[in-house]
Image (spheres, rainbow, N blue to C red):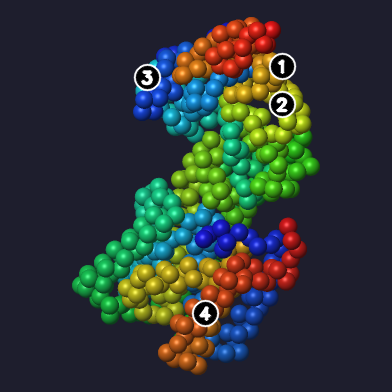
Amino acid sequence: MSGPLLSARGLRLAFGGVKAADGIDLDVMPGEFLAIIGPNGAGKTTFINMTTGYLKPQGGSIAYDGEPILGLAPRAIVRRGIGRSFQLPQLFAEHTVLENAALAIAARSGLWSPLTPLLRPAWRAEAMAVLERFGLAPLAEARADALNEGARKLADIAMAVALQPRLILMDEPTSGVAAAEKMSVVETLVRVLREAKVTAVFVEHDMEVVERFADRVAVWNQGRIAALGPPQQVLNDPAVLRDVIGIEPAHHA
Amino acid sequence: MSGTVTAPARRVAPIGEALLALLGIAAVILAAWAVPWLKFILTVALAKGIAVLGILLLLRAGQVSFGHSMFLAIGAYTVAFLAPALPEALLLLPLGAAIAGLFGLVIGLFVVRYRDIFFGMLNLALSMVLYSLLEKLYSLTKGTDGIRVSGLRFAGITPDLATQEWVMFGLALGLAILFGLLVRAYLGSPMGRALAGIKTRETRLEFMGVSARRVLLAAYVLSAVMGGVAGTLVAMTSRHVTPQLAYWTSSGELVFIAVLGGAGSALGPFLGAAAFELVRVYAAAAVADAWQMILGAVLLLVILFAPGGLWGMLAGRLGRRP
């Protein structure tokens, strides 16, 4: 397990004239938390979409655990152990939070049992255990569309974690979460992912979150990785501050 | 559209649902015994209820099939074609179901790639192709004249007419209970809950490693089997099959019954079918020229004032809010 868990080489994808990926090389090491930052339209979500099979790059390669995954359908990639959560939570709105989590657990064995209840004792217990780790147990019986944004984000990630991935890609896990609850949401998230030994790549706009929780930061700009390294180094790089974050270095210093 | 008619209006405790089912079964038997000429109508209503269970499954996925009576026709014509050589009803029934299921699988592989209006219209188009074939291939199907179903045997016995009516009624009731329980279990299972997920978040299914198309296909095949069962029952009861069974108005009727009965419970289709057939009979007797108008008015009132259908109205009285 010394090699990278995820390895992207020379990824290219353009939408019309806009280069969403213009030669992306990136290695994600097992166990690390890698933050992706950068201005809107830099290609951050595109990278997640390419890795999860939702978009097909025009060039380059992606290997997961040493094996190429490019060209596989999203559900085949999920089955190999790459989970994802969404900027806009993708929950089954008419189902309860518990059923949402239980469906993810059922999905691991392919869902194909037409006569035994979804909320059979074993799956109900496991779903409750997942929800408890995320602090969502009190909301288990609530309909998913009745939750506030923070809870919806956590439930969305809980579903991805219930699939027991080795790598999770999270698109802005804290966007839309009220400022007051943001840090607690992230703390819960990081604790659960560390416990489950899940490697994480997450797109994030909040530099405080990045500084506190990321092992490494990749700075996206116009489809390229402009900088890559530990947060204290990258977030103090004058070029990054000026071009990507939009702060004059002197002001920050 | 489907959002208003398919959402379970309220949750009723399983015991209440079971009690209501038992009451319904008792009422149907009592009615068939007390009013002999109702037996035929109730048998057809139970058969249609089984077909509408299939519509209900697809409604849960937010999909409406406007051609589903093609599977009913396939079951019915299976009986009509095979009865001369194989008059055993207890073999014709599973055969009709299996052949309808097979058609369901082949057609399903194609239609589950589409959603909403495309799904509905493709089903409609395919059912009209079947209708045309049944109508035009006169040497095989006798066209619009249809085929008479000749003397059936039940477990080797040919009962007299009165007994046979009871046997058909009993078969229809038994199968209605069986498929009602089956659909109820299915809807609570992972596959049934995923089916409902197609309506709200199909992409999430894919990102859980599940093929949404296969989830829909499984339900589609099951609904085709139930359509086939309904068709065999209708053919054996009415003793006459015509292409009308596959005509779009027949499919529309199934959707009509589904909305009338409500999609919140496996009881809904049977409530709807019973109400539909009874209103039809009595309205046709009372005002021969206007019975369709009366049915239309009933449906309009249900959609406007009871979007959960007849089941929703009952559940509202029995149930508690979730």
Chain-order first, disc 1 or disc 3: 3
| Type of amino acid at the residue the image marks with label 2 | Val
| Type of amino acid at the residue the image marks with label 4 | Ala
Instruction: Confirm or deny contact between disc 1 and disc 2 (CB under 8 A).
Output: yes
Instruction: Confirm or deny contact between disc 1 and disc 3 (CB under 8 A).
Output: no
Q: In which quarter of the image is residue B305?
A: bottom right
Q: Is residue B86 visible?
A: no
x and y, in percent, of residue B125 in the image:
33, 61
Q: How crowded is mark 2: few (under 14 residues within 10 Å), some or many (20 or more)?
A: some
Same-chain check, marks 2 and 4: no
- What residue does disc 1 label? A212
- What residue does disc 2 label? A186
| Type of amino acid at the residue the image marks with label 3 | Gly
- What residue does disc 4 label? B297
Q: Residue at x 35, y 71 (%)?
A: B247
Q: Quadrant of the C terminus of chain A?
A: top right
SS at mark 2 in the image? helix
Badge 2 sits on which subunit? A
